[in-house]
Image: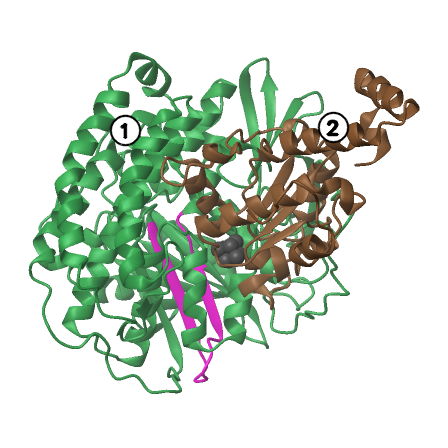
Chain colours: A brown, B green
């Protein structure tokens, strides 16, 4: 997490400074763990659905797939209160600047999941004149969930991958690094935390 | 039809006739407006419903084919008009003064083909931005993405619109007009707004809480399906139908298949016909369930979504077992269906039919009679029958205004003429009526399924279809009753393996266009009620 993001939490800053002065790195480490743990279990999505994939996202919110089990159910209508965008659906030329603006309005730390073939590469509309061939040219992406549309189970898996990623964020060296999760975890084992669970 | 032809021939000697699946009249542009007026106002013809306008590029000329229906006589006619002027500035006279929906349809043609409609009060692009270069559905359009790249900057906006008028000596003049009055207070709603049901944008001029005018902005999910279809073979075009109105995936698929089958003269086995109808009706129940859920959620009754999605999930399970997908099924094929029914199908459907009445009763108990519900919905957004026809509002929304427009009754297809069901028509025309029509339609759909489920005949599910499918030269139009209204497909073939032109006439475009008319003078909170009760799906209108 960039240092700037701490700015308006002065008491934490003080605490960190204090700890650093007395050289207790272990505690900072665990504090990071604590914060990341908290974050990773309450990531709130922005309600953002442009087309078909968005409907599966609605099913995800209903009783059967029940994303409330994981702490994601608080879908926010305003980007200022959300943690991640689940880009569920096709992004076309006219929508691209809007998506970019929504991303800019999200508060740090922010994450993006590209959900479905369209968001990943243009999907079935690759030949079209009015479809962005993947949202990666517009905003950085953390997790890709393939499918047309991905089943709700796949979406759950995708968001869980994101929360795993957040848990070890400190060691990622910043948000939105597009390193493969598994490879990363293998080469960066963390004591006491088994991220494969 | 013969006397109509005679009558037109007498009044307009220059008209030429052609007998395709619909009687087609070709008329020079100069007489088109006059003919349209006669067609609409003559009591014997009374073509009062403009179904769609198909823009065409025949390479050497541009033009339009207008499909008109008569709601009193249940007859259809098509009118072909070739644009005058050169390719840079082709002109046709507008009929937006005769049909309210004409304005939006003509804007769509202008956006895709660059045909200018003389007299249309609002000649702006509809789906593409004002800086878009070229007209994408013309045959000579350059698809190179460098010409129209994905923009990173915000889109340029204009407060002006244009209208083209003919002056006294026949010269065409372009006039500039403001969309809103200069001192209007304009609030922007959408495109990213939970209550617009997708990415639709309303520029709303308000006076305090009261809505003065709404300018509907579309195109935030315009994916260019019609153009892609021209590059694909016929079987390849099918899967796009699932992705338009994803709740009506089965009916839409059914429509395109029927249109191609009609053109190629393919006889569909009876077993496949019955399966298709059952699937259509299951989709309708699932779609109306989701409508009730999201509509109630828009009004603040969040819990309803969980109740209604319960039934929807059960239907999706049935589909999942047979079609192998929860949403984009790709199940109907040209000449039949892709796979046979799952062994559990009949059992599962019967279980569904059993719980459905209980569920509907529960919905009514929870929501319909509620005082708040009634206050918010009764008398809100009243659409008269005449306006419904003029605005081409079909489906449950049209039937709530007293227009019996169910395609399953007016032009039965598949096995709909063998089953018994009532067409639900109400006369109030308000949001409550639109809601209730859908509630009752679920029961009727269940009734249709109940009649068929024990009588699915044995036999083939797929007719013999040539590996490489070519349609003969000609044009065909086919309509079905989608979950949101009459859905039409127009195919023009030049004898090749892919369509020369495939036009999709979606029910949701008029539904969105009418929002301005319905909300004028009501409060801004009613916009959510009215929009929700119309139940449009944005990818369907944008294509
Ligand atoms: S990936 Fe498939 S289901 Fe998702 S938005 Fe694109 S077309 Fe629709």
The answer to whether residue B161 is seen in the rendering is no
Q: What residue is shown at x 74% (from left), y 51% (from top)?
A: A188
Provide residue B230's location: percent of width, then percent of height: 52, 73
Please name whichever residue, A180 or B218, is drawn nearer the observer in this view of the structure: A180
Q: Is mark 1 within 8 Å of ligand 1?
A: no
Give the tally of numbered discs.
2
Determine which of the numbered discs, if any, sits on residue B433 in the image. Answer: 1
In three-dimensional space, the C-alpha distance between marks 1 and 2, rounded to whole angstroms, equals 58 Å
Q: Tell me if residue A131 is in the magenta stretch.
A: no
Indicate which label's residue lies in the foreground, 1 or 2. 2
The residue indicated by pointer 2 is A31
Tell me which segment is drawn in magenta: B486-507
Please name whichever residue, B492 or B2, is drawn nearer the observer in this view of the structure: B492
Provide residue B146's location: percent of width, then percent of height: 77, 65
Q: Chain of mark 1?
A: B
SS under mark 2: helix
């Amino acid at each position: 997490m960039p240092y700037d993001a701490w700015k308006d939490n002065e008491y934490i800053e003080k605490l960190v400074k204090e700890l650093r002065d007395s050289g207790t790195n272990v505690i900072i480490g665990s504090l990071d763990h604590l914060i990341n743990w908290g974050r990773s279990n309450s990531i709130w999505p922005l309600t953002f659905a442009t087309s078909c994939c968005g409907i599966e996202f609605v099913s995800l919110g209903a009783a059967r797939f029940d994303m409330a089990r994981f702490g994601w159910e608080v879908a926010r209508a305003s980007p200022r209160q959300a943690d991640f965008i689940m880009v569920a659906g096709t992004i076309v030329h006219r929508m691209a600047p809007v998506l970019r603006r929504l991303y800019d309005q999200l508060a740090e730390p922010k994450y993006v999941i590209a959900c479905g073939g369209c968001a990943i590469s243009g999907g079935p509309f690759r030949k079209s004149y009015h479809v962005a061939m993947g949202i990666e040219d517009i905003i950085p992406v953390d997790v890709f969930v393939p499918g047309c549309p991905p089943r709700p189970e796949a979406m759950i898996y995708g968001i869980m991958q994101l929360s795993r990623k957040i848990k070890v964020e400190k060691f990622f060296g910043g948000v939105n690094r597009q390193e493969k999760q598994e490879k990363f975890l293998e080469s960066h084992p963390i004591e006491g935390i088994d991220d494969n669970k | 039809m013969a006397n109509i032809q005679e009558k037109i021939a007498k009044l307009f000697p220059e008209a030429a006739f052609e007998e395709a699946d619909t009687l087609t009249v070709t008329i020079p542009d100069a007489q088109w407006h006059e003919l349209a007026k006669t067609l609409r106002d003559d009591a014997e013809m009374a073509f009062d419903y403009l179904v769609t306008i198909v823009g065409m590029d025949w390479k050497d000329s541009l033009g339009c084919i207008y499909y008109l229906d008569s709601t009193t006589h249940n007859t259809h006619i098509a009118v072909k008009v070739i644009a005058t002027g050169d390719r840079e500035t082709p002109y046709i006279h507008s009929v937006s003064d005769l049909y309210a929906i004409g304005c939006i349809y003509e804007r769509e043609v202008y956006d895709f083909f660059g045909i200018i409609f003389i007299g249309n009060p609002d000649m702006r692009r509809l789906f593409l931005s004002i800086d878009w270069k070229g007209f994408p559905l013309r045959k000579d359009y350059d698809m190179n993405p460098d010409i129209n790249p994905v923009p990173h900057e915000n889109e340029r906006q204009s407060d002006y619109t244009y209208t083209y008028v003919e002056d006294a000596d026949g010269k065409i003049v372009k006039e500039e007009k403001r969309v809103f009055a200069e001192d209007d207070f304009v609030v922007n709603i959408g495109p990213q707004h939970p209550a617009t049901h997708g990415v639709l944008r309303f520029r709303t001029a308000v006076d305090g809480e009261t809505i003065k005018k709404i300018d509907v902005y579309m195109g935030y999910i315009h994916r260019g399906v019609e153009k892609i279809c021209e590059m694909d073979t016929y079987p390849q075009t099918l899967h796009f139908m699932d992705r338009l109105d994803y709740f009506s995936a089965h009916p839409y698929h059914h429509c395109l298949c029927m249109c191609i089958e009609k053109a190629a003269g393919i006889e569909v086995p009876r077993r496949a016909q019955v399966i298709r109808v059952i699937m259509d009706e299951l989709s309708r129940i699932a779609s109306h369930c989701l409508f009730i859920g999201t509509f109630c959620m828009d009004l603040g009754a969040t819990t309803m979504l969980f109740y209604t999605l319960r039934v929807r999930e059960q239907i999706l399970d049935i589909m999942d077992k047979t079609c192998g997908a929860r949403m984009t099924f790709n199940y109907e094929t040209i000449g039949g269906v892709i796979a046979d029914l799952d062994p559990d199908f009949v059992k599962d459907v019967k279980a569904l039919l059993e719980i459905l009445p209980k569920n509907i009763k529960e919905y009514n108990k929870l929501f319909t009679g509620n005082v708040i519900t009634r206050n918010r919905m009764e008398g809100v957004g009243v659409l008269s029958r005449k306006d419904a026809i003029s605005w081409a509002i079909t489906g449950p929304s049209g039937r709530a205004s007293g227009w019996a427009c169910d395609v399953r009754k007016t032009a039965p297809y598949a096995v709909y003429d063998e089953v018994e069901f009532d067409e639900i028509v109400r006369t109030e025309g308000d949001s409550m009526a639109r809601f209730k029509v859908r509630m009752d339609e679920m029961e009727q759909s269940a009734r249709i399924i109940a009649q068929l489920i024990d009588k699915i005949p044995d036999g083939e599910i797929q007719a013999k279809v040539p590996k490489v499918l070519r349609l003969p030269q000609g044009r065909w139009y086919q309509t079905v009753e989608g979950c949101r209204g009459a859905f039409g497909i127009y195919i023009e073939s030049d004898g090749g393996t892919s369509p020369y032109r495939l036009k999709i006439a979606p029910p949701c475009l008029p539904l969105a266009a009418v929002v301005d008319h319905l909300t004028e003078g009501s409060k801004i909170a009613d916009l959510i009620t009215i929009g929700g009760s119309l139940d449009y799906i944005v990818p369907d209108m944008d294509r």
